[in-house]
Image: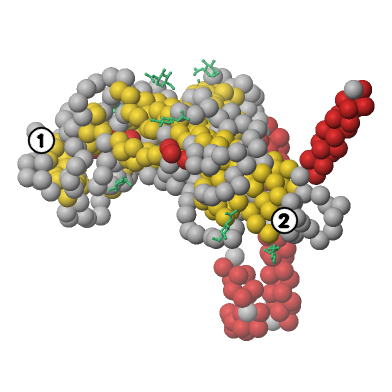
Amino acid sequence: MKTLHLSVILLTLSGVLAHSDWGVNYPNNPICAVRGFSVSIPCSYSYPKSKPNIQVIQMLWCSMNSNTDKCQNPPYVYNSSSITTSDFEYAGDNKSNCTLLIHNVQFSYSGEYRFRFITDVSGGMWTGEPGATLQVADLKVSLIRLSGIGTLKQGDSLNLTCDVNCTQSSSQFVWSKNNERLNTSGPVLHFPAVTVRDSGNYSCTWKTNRASGSETISLLVEGGWGVNYTTPICAVRGFSVSIPCSYSYPQHNYQVTQMLWCSMNSNTGGCHNPPYVYNSASITTSDFEYAGDDKSDCTLLIHNVQFSYSGEYRFRFITDVSSGMWTGEPGQILQVSDLKVSLIRLSGNGTLKQGDSLNLTCDVNCTQSSSQFVWSKNNERLNTSGRVLHFPAVTVRDSGNYTCTWKTNRASGSETISLLVEGENQWTIWIIVLVIAGVIFISVTGAVIYNRRFLCDCRFVHTEQQKEDDSTIYENAQQQMGSFAIYANVK
Ligand SMILES: *[C@@H]1O[C@H](CO)[C@@H](O)[C@H](O)[C@H]1NC(C)=O
Ligand SMILES: *[C@@H]1O[C@H](CO)[C@@H](O)[C@H](O)[C@H]1NC(C)=O
Ligand SMILES: *[C@@H]1O[C@H](CO)[C@@H](O)[C@H](O)[C@H]1NC(C)=O
Ligand SMILES: *[C@@H]1O[C@H](CO)[C@@H](O)[C@H](O)[C@H]1NC(C)=O
Ligand SMILES: *[C@@H]1O[C@H](CO)[C@@H](O)[C@H](O)[C@H]1NC(C)=O
Ligand SMILES: *[C@@H]1O[C@H](CO)[C@@H](O)[C@H](O)[C@H]1NC(C)=O
Ligand SMILES: *[C@@H]1O[C@H](CO)[C@@H](O)[C@H](O)[C@H]1NC(C)=O
Ligand SMILES: *[C@@H]1O[C@H](CO)[C@@H](O)[C@H](O)[C@H]1NC(C)=O
Ligand SMILES: *[C@@H]1O[C@H](CO)[C@@H](O)[C@H](O)[C@H]1NC(C)=O
Ligand SMILES: *[C@@H]1O[C@H](CO)[C@@H](O)[C@H](O)[C@H]1NC(C)=O
Ligand SMILES: *[C@@H]1O[C@H](CO)[C@@H](O)[C@H](O)[C@H]1NC(C)=O
Ligand SMILES: *[C@@H]1O[C@H](CO)[C@@H](O)[C@H](O)[C@H]1NC(C)=O
């Protein structure tokens, strides 16, 4: 009894040892695939390496939906001896890799799959069981309205959600709009308030390292007719300003054919007639430049702004649909202001001297909330910000050209003032320079007079009596002495 028991255990043990050489490895957990897409079922197999030159002669995959047990008989989804084109593609080899690719996965493909291989050794064949489990899921993108009913309108709130009825731990969702990847991850794309620009084709791609799938949904937001301007804009005379503007219309089949900007200083009402400051149908060079497009952007740039440009501006657009045209009113308000830099003496008078105290102030007669002042000296930016540049005690080195630049996100302007500080030391230098100059001047003139006397007296020594010849001699001297003689003559 005892011996029999032992032999049974030994038999089992030897069997286990033999089995460890033969095997097929599948992933432990079910594999998730998306209907209509592909999935890869990783698989590896082994057989005794102790027997050299053992050859694998047949590789087979079977589905437990149509086969049983060890899949000793057909049907197979893959038979290496009779390869047919099907959704099941063997991506392994005849050594150790038995990876199976399944294309165009269907719900009916859900189930267990087993790999079997046959070697050239008699009785040397193996089926890996239990097999790999495949779950086929559906990928659905749905639009969940959080506000509004009927067609989608601007301002409506919604979620696009991506659902896969399969729990795969390491999967990710990638969203793209019109084939351009979006920066959001996760199964939900949230729109607190849609705009016309949100219209497009949205795709959700679900990915694991073995499968992927994607689904697209179309979003169409109807704009309604409208032009969007902003709060009054401040510009600085002589500089440029950008007037942001956007417009919308019901999108289907509408094509914008003409864009117009008019000024309420010269036009009225809905600007149905000229004059226009911009007309896309007859473009002329002027201070008014259109920086928008024929879709939704109606930004206007105005260069070299003048005080007379202050006022209201309206945008009008015309589409190819009859009576499909719109003027946005009331329009955009433009205020033109002056930028002034002034010097305010806090001490001293007359010319600026060292130690004097002063402020340079930059004034813009316009109230724009988010504007900033930037100061620079001789074109080098200073570290101060704010409207006032304060000098508690100026020095000669503070002399220079100071520029104040005023900036908003739509306009800018700048103005320069010159500061000249006279130093005490400079006066003494000037006095010394003047004294030296004076000395030099006196010496030079002295020498000239002396020279003239000396030259002329020389001649006079010999012709002292002939005073009437004086002029003749003088003329000779003139000819001989050239320019110096002329100078002497003038003296
Ligand atoms: C195994 O595959 C290699 C390359 O694919 C091939 O050359 C070889 O003949 C195959 N062996 C058998 C036994 O089919
Ligand atoms: C695989 O296909 C070949 C050719 O049709 C066939 O002879 C063989 O029996 C098949 N293998 C199995 C295990 O059924
Ligand atoms: C098995 O083959 C597949 C497909 O050719 C490949 O992606 C995979 O890396 C291979 N596995 C191993 C362990 O080499
Ligand atoms: C997912 O849902 C579909 C029906 O919509 C069903 O046929 C399929 O079996 C489900 N998949 C899983 C993994 O639950
Ligand atoms: C994407 O988002 C991250 C963080 O939310 C941000 O740092 C990055 O700049 C964004 N990239 C683009 C292209 O918007
Ligand atoms: C919509 O998405 C937001 C943000 O992801 C989420 O907080 C909210 O619960 C979602 N609402 C619905 C009804 O799905
Ligand atoms: C969205 O998809 C539809 C058809 O699927 C196509 O006609 C349309 O041009 C696409 N729109 C964009 C913006 O790609
Ligand atoms: C105008 O702008 C506001 C705020 O940016 C936005 O809510 C609205 O949808 C826009 N309207 C149009 C017609 O573009
Ligand atoms: C700023 O002052 C100038 C006169 O210096 C005036 O013409 C202009 O209208 C003023 N601008 C504003 C916005 O008050
Ligand atoms: C200039 O300043 C001095 C002292 O700082 C003062 O005595 C003088 O009256 C001032 N002159 C003028 C014109 O303000
Ligand atoms: C001069 O500038 C200082 C510092 O910015 C300021 O406190 C002072 O009020 C200014 N004085 C005048 C008269 O502008
Ligand atoms: C200051 O500006 C004047 C004329 O605007 C120019 O002649 C002078 O060279 C400038 N000074 C400096 C230091 O840039």
| Residue at x 68%, y 70% (from the top left corner) | 452
Residue 7 location in percent, x, y? 89, 31
Spot the residue most to the right: 3
Image x and y of residue 366, in percent: 34, 25
Query: Is 481 in front, or is 93?
Result: 93
Name which residue lies at 19% across and 42% down: 252
Give SS at disc 2.
strand
Q: Residue at x 54, y 50 (%)?
A: 74
Question: Quick one: 41 or 167, which is closer to the camera?
Answer: 41
Amino acid type shown at disc 2: Thr
- The vertical placement of 279 against 475, above or below, is above
Tag 1 residue: 270
Q: Residues within 10 Å of mark 2 (few under 14, many from 20)?
A: some
| Badge 2 vs badge 1, beta-carbon distance below 8 Å | no
Q: Which residue is mark 2?
A: 119
Residue in front for this viewpoint, 393 or 220:
220
On the rendered image, what quadrant is the C terminus found in?
bottom right
Instruction: Kindly state the secondary structure of the residue where label 1 is placed.
Output: loop
Along the viewing direction, whichever of 34 and 363 lies nearer the viewer:
34
| Ligand 1 within 8 angstroms of badge 2 C-beta | no
Any part of residue 252 in sight:
yes
Decide if residue 176 is in sight here: no
Residue drawn at 48 percent across, 58 percent down: 85
Specify the amino acid type for callout 1.
Answer: Gly
Q: Report the number of discs.
A: 2
Which marked residue is nearer to the observer: mark 2 or mark 1? Answer: 2
